[in-house]
Image (tube, rainbow, N blue to C red):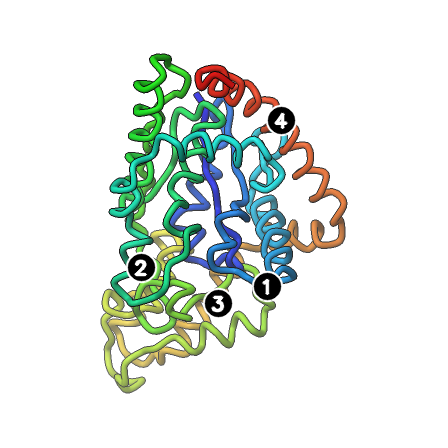
Amino acid sequence: MKILSGIQPTGRFHWGNYFGAIRQYIDLQHNEQAFYFIADYHALTTVRDPQALRGFVRDAAIDLLALGLKPETATLFRQSDIPEVTELTWLLMTVTQMHLLDKCHAFKDKKAKGIAADAGLFTYPVLMAADILLYDSDLVPVGADQIQHIEVTRDIAGRFNQIYGVEALKLPSPHVVDSTAKVVGLDGEKMSKSYGNTIEMFEPDKKLRKRIMSIKTDSTPVEDPKNPETCSVFTLFKLFANDEQQAELAAKYRAGGMGYGEAKQALFDAAMAYFADARARRAELERSPDTVEDVLREGARKARDVGRQVLDRVRSACGL
């Protein structure tokens, strides 16, 4: 069983990234084979500052290792270290029909907003298909709103196999991750870099506390009872706290006499405790950049060993 997942380095990871996806991806690393790549080619559709991109890639690798991804269990690599993926992308492009790409979400969304979309954005589903197919992936963990990506990959692979009359490409299946954890941002909306309402996992203590203290709340007086279930602070607190801790804070909400500042401090303390080990590991990795680079290089070597075998099959099927 092979698991494949890619993460775009378009900024620092935040709580929404972790609880919505990363935590579950790391849990899946204990399968027979797990491949995790940092999708820097995909990031080029939005990040045009080379220095920033290199920093995002480095931070993504450090964050994933700090959060528990184990190189001895999972293969972690940079997408751009795998030249086989770009060759496979072109071979797949020759069988991909335009109408399939025209209906993909990211391209449609940008067109609807009147934003100019370049060829990279239009054809990114083919690169994504190559990312998945190059490693004979069995399962690809995705959110429910990303199943289309796997359907497109299956369509492209199936058409390739049909045209050339061989089973050169394995058709992957989606593994829908549990996205029931509600991760709200500072403004009460879904936490997203697009909205500028995120809380990063590894922000310095003082900056993290300041962000948490800026979470939007209502104007209920301190002495009045409050409803924890409609409060963004409590919604976030539940991500970090056990049942007993949740019940204790909820009781304070309902009893009155507690200001939102106290609830925000409880959230800060809970988040710091939850990520304490990861923060310590990250600080250690920051001091060992060569270790991180070695992990990525070794991951690329392993990924290329697998990818070459698949690419050889595809090239042979095409007559190359």
State left or right for residue 277 relative to residue 109. right
Give the residue displayed 44% in from the left and 16% down from the top: 317
Q: CA distance from mark 4 to mark 1?
A: 29 Å
Q: CA distance from mark 1 to mark 3?
A: 33 Å
Q: Describe the element under mark 1 as helix, strand or loop.
A: loop
- Disc with the residue nearer the chain's start (1 vs 3): 1
Q: CA distance from mark 3 to mark 2?
A: 17 Å
- Disc with the residue nearer the chain's start (4 vs 3): 3
- Disc with the residue nearer the chain's start (3 vs 2): 2
For label 2, the residue is: 247
Q: Position of residue 63 (x, y in %)?
A: 58, 51
Vertical side of 171 occupied by 181: above or below: below
- Look at label 2 and name its amino acid: Ala
Q: Nearer the viewer, mark 4 or mark 1?
A: 1
- Disc with the residue nearer the chain's start (2 vs 1): 1
For label 1, the residue is: 49
Q: Residues within 10 Å of mark 3 (few under 14, many from 20)?
A: many
For label 4, the residue is: 302
Q: Look at the image and tell me in which quarter the N terminus lies.
A: top left
- Disc with the residue nearer the chain's start (4 vs 2): 2
- Look at label 3 and name its amino acid: Phe
For label 3, the residue is: 268
Give the residue displayed 60% in from the left and 68% down from the top: 204
- Look at label 4 and name its amino acid: Lys
